[in-house]
Image (tube, rainbow, N blue to C red):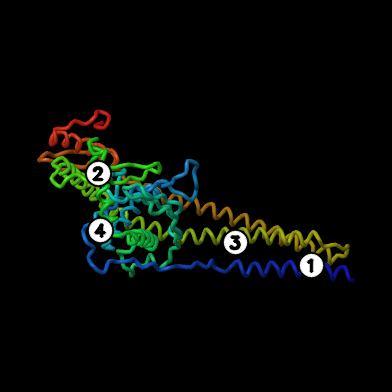
Amino acid sequence: MIAPMKMTLRILCVFSLMLFIGIHDTEAKTIKYEKVQLDIAQNEIPFEELLDVGIMIFDPNVPEKENPMIFPEIRKAEARYMPYHLKKTLENTGHWGGVWVLPERSKAIDLIIVGRIEKSDGLDVELKIGVWDVVGSQWINKTYESNIAKSSYSKRRDLTQDPYQNIFNKIANDLLQIKQSKDREALIRLSQTGEIRFASELIPVYDDYISKNKKNIYSLERLPSEDDEIMQRILEVQEREFLLLDTLNEYYGQLYENLSQPYEDWRKLSREDMITYEELQRSARTRKILGAVALAGALATDGDSRASSTMRQMAVYGGIEAMRSGFATASEAKIYQESLKESGADFDSQAQPLVIELEGQTIRLTGSAEEKFQEWRRLLKEIYIDETGFTIPQAEAE
């Protein structure tokens, strides 16, 4: 009599545990959202304190081995979309000078921002950001993370705010905090150092104006005289580079506008799918655990009575069914992965030829943005040779 009672208690405990876990399995994942306010300038910033900022096209971070949760076409589009929205965010603060998206590094820019997309699925976003100034000092080396609320995709929100706006505001606020820690003289000297670095890239005569230590940090040794004609012409060349960046950023702006709505729609859909997918994964794991517990409880029963045998069979059957249900749900989650992968098809954008006016001539630049920029650099050096009469070593001119 005692043995069947013990067995009955074991079975009841197993099913009680199954019921307890099952109830908790239905609870939704709790996500904490934050609202990050962008620091906007309340007064006009003096011109000499406005640093120029260049944002490199982000590293899409597409793994060589296929990852079912990363869609290369979307990542490549994000790698161009995100830098441009960060540009817009920085411009809206009023704390900076010119802000451009860059196809490659430029010594004409005071600050360079590089980024790598670690995660982006509409629900969670994670960016690795590095920032260096033209002197060589690192300002930021940080991974930014943010959970995206459903309201971030609402049509009633401020549509100038991207669903990922919090993470862009964090980056902008951190940059401002570092800038504000530097005094006016330091900011001016930083820009002057950049001008000399740009000049020394074109002509070696300015190499003596700056020095570099073992940590690759540049120091300004002296400045050219105000009536230095060569330096004035180099600054004109620098302005032409800014002209190219303006033109390239018109292209990036068009790409940004074209991607804006489909990219937001994809992120909204992806967010819903990721929540469903995570719930399916949790459900599958829980059901497998429940099945294992039920089987363990059934196999642990003893006794030779008909009641014992019947209850044992019920427990074994219930455990197997729970495990089957778990594996079936996991298969459903894999199907969801495939569905997400398909939704990322045909999202990449092809580069278009760029036609610009230079010295009364129409120039057609083709290839990628990087190739356009390299060709423009070559043309600038040719212009410099014509205007100054100085020659540039062949290795530098190429």
Name which residue lies at 13% across and 41% down. 229
Q: Going by the image, does 120 lie left or right of 134?
A: right
Q: Nearer the viewer, mark 4 or mark 3?
A: 4
Q: Earlier in the sequence, mark 4 or mark 3?
A: 4
Q: Amino acid at mark 2?
A: Ile
Q: Nearer the viewer, mark 2 or mark 3?
A: 2
**Callout 2 environment at 10 Å: few (<14), some (14 to 19), or many (20+)?**
many
Residue 49 marker: 4
Q: Nearer the viewer, mark 4 or mark 1?
A: 4
Name which residue lies at 40% across and 54% down. 140
Q: Earlier in the sequence, mark 3 or mark 1?
A: 1
Name the foreground residue: 15 vs 307: 15
Element carrying mark 4: helix
Q: Residue furthest front?
A: 221
Q: Is residue 141 visible?
A: yes
Q: Earlier in the sequence, mark 2 or mark 4?
A: 4
**Callout 4 environment at 10 Å: few (<14), some (14 to 19), or many (20+)?**
many
Name the foreground residue: 237 vs 338: 237
Q: Going by the image, does 122 lie left or right of 241?
A: right
Q: Amino acid at mark 4?
A: Glu
Q: Amino acid at mark 1?
A: Arg
Q: Which residue is mark 3?
A: 283
Element carrying mark 1: helix
